[in-house]
Amino acid sequence: MDDVRATSAWVATHSSHVLVDSSGIEKVVDTIESIPKVDWDFEGIHYFDNGPLTVQYLFVLDALNFCFWPDKDLSYDHLASGLKAALQNDKSAFDADRLQKYTGPQLRELLKWPRPLPLEDERVRLLHEVGFELERSFEGKASNIVESCGKSAVKLVAAITRHFPGFRDHSLYKGHQVFLYKRAQILAADLWGAFRGKGYGEFNDIGSITIMADYIVPAVLRQLGVLKYSSTLANIIDANNEIGSGSEEEVELRACSIYAVEKMRELISQKSGKQVLSVELDLWLWSFGIQFPSLPHHRTLSIYY
């Protein structure tokens, strides 16, 4: 994940629209006695059977984990719980051969959603991609990818982005390639959280994972005074206007969030004398954000988050 950290830092130091406020970071860290341990499935919405089927579920979940905001009634919870119910009803629902055949209406039926999903065609395309490559290279099982990575989250993210183009979350910014890898990293984090760092979730380098740059975390960091926006960008976000995928503003919002939380993590570690994981900070910030759904967030149509 060195590329994610290094390129996000480059964006933060060359940013035109988003400022990482060092004093804001210090103020937030000063108020933190310790990072609250947020249970991975604190809402009880995920499938878990402690085996390979959970890995398959999480892989499908994170392949589809993006862009809920265009439908005001749709959220991540609907996706996670809908896929859970589908799998409980039919243990073969996520077999690789079946993933390659789903249509938009069938995906809606799987999730019990009454109308077309945001970016539905892309969601179906990504399901097909996942099913095809799982069958071609991993005997149809996502657990085989995890087992091939030797308890390394970094190797898992590399394998996912190498084999599955839909997970290649990167952008061009002022002539520089920027790597963000939200959904590939969140798969490693979900495995670690679901299996509590054991079995399929045992990674010796889980500390290498950064936060997952989405649209909730920047909104929380802005609320906390860690991120400051230009007046133009603030007006766009506060008016619920759309920001283009791959635009300078969008890349800065995501990359500066990663950079800011890395600085928070370093400062908390120095203050407490204990290692703090970015994945723990991410879950804490995300759980904070979903408690305040009215927080204005940027709106971008993207398959990456």
Image: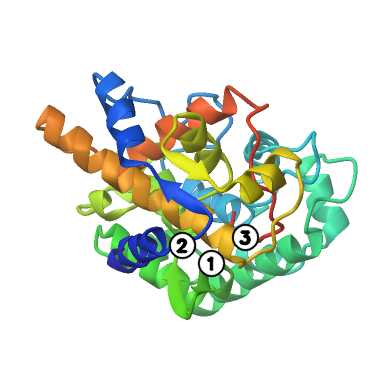
State the residue in front, 110 or 266: 266
Can you tell which mark lies on residue 167?
A: 1
- Residues at circles 2 and 1 in contact by the CB criterion of under 8 Å: yes
Q: For mark 3, what is the residue?
A: 95
Q: CA distance from mark 3 to mark 1?
A: 20 Å
Q: Position of residue 189 (x, y in %)?
A: 39, 47
Q: Is residue 38 above or below residue 18?
A: above
Seen at 59% across and 58% down, the residue is: 250
Q: For mark 2, what is the residue?
A: 181
Query: Mark 2 or mark 3: which is in front?
Result: 2
Seen at 70% across and 36% down, the residue is: 78
- The quadrant where residue 21 appears: top left
The residue sitting at the front extreme is 231
Q: Is residue 97 left or right of residue 37?
A: right
The secondary structure type at the circle numbered 2 is loop
Can you tell which mark lies on residue 192?
A: none
